[in-house]
Amino acid sequence: VRDFAAERLAASGEEHAVRAAHAVHVAAVGETFRGVGTPDPVVARVVALQAEWGVALAWTREHAPALHTRVAAALGLVLNDYGRAREAHTELGLAIERSGVTDATGGWAAVVRAFTAIALGSRSEAPLMEAGLAALRAAGDVPKYQLALEVAGVYWLFAEEPERALEYSAEGLALARG
């Protein structure tokens, strides 16, 4: 059935538009995930699309690099939390290599890439964490920056730098309080 559907989609002349719309949807749902503490209905919605994560990543990796950055960034924490940190790390690395760390999407990708690195046992991506936070700060996306500060706090805790963890966590809390 999938092969038939893929053939029909290709024959329709709308394959690029349909696959791009699918990837945008997967990214939009993934962007609602906030890691630990995400409300159950949001988690259920994200997990319901689990079979689509790889499809969206693979297609965008090949055909839409800018959209790939958005999808990889949106799914980075999800993949990490569902035991696929290595896959997240790889996808985010490719996305950053192509798109850089110059806007909110690239900044979030960098923060999550550094976080997946520490989850995999590597402390080598601290500069990427800092670059990602700087990009998010400059972009003015306060909710995403606040989440990034929370992730950075956990990162620095895992990196055995509790003072830095406290610094970033406190800044995130101050933003949350308004």
Image (cartoon, rainbow, N blue to C red):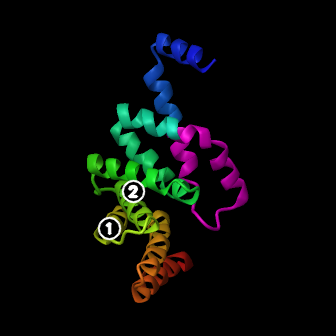
Looking at the picture, tell me which residue is in the foreground, 69 or 7: 7
Instruction: State the residue lying farthest toward the right.
Output: 41
In the image, which residues are magenta? 24-53
Residue 66, placed above or below residue 167: above
The residue sitting at 35% across, 61% down in the picture is 139
Residue 41 falls within the magenta-colored stretch: yes
Q: Is residue 156 left or right of residue 28?
A: left
Separation of disc 1 and disc 2 at Cα? 12 Å
- Ranked by sequence position, the earlier of labels 1 and 2 is 2
Say which residue label 1 marks. Answer: 125
Query: Residue 85 at x, y = what percent?
Result: 48, 57
Query: Residue 78 at x, y = what percent?
Result: 55, 55
Instruction: Please tell me whether mark 2 sits on a helix, a strand or a loop.
Output: helix
The residue sitting at 27% across, 50% down in the picture is 97
Task: Look at the image and tell me in which quarter the N terminus lies.
Answer: top right
Q: Quadrant of residue 145?
A: bottom left
Say which residue label 2 marks. Answer: 109
Residue 41, placed above or below residue 136: above
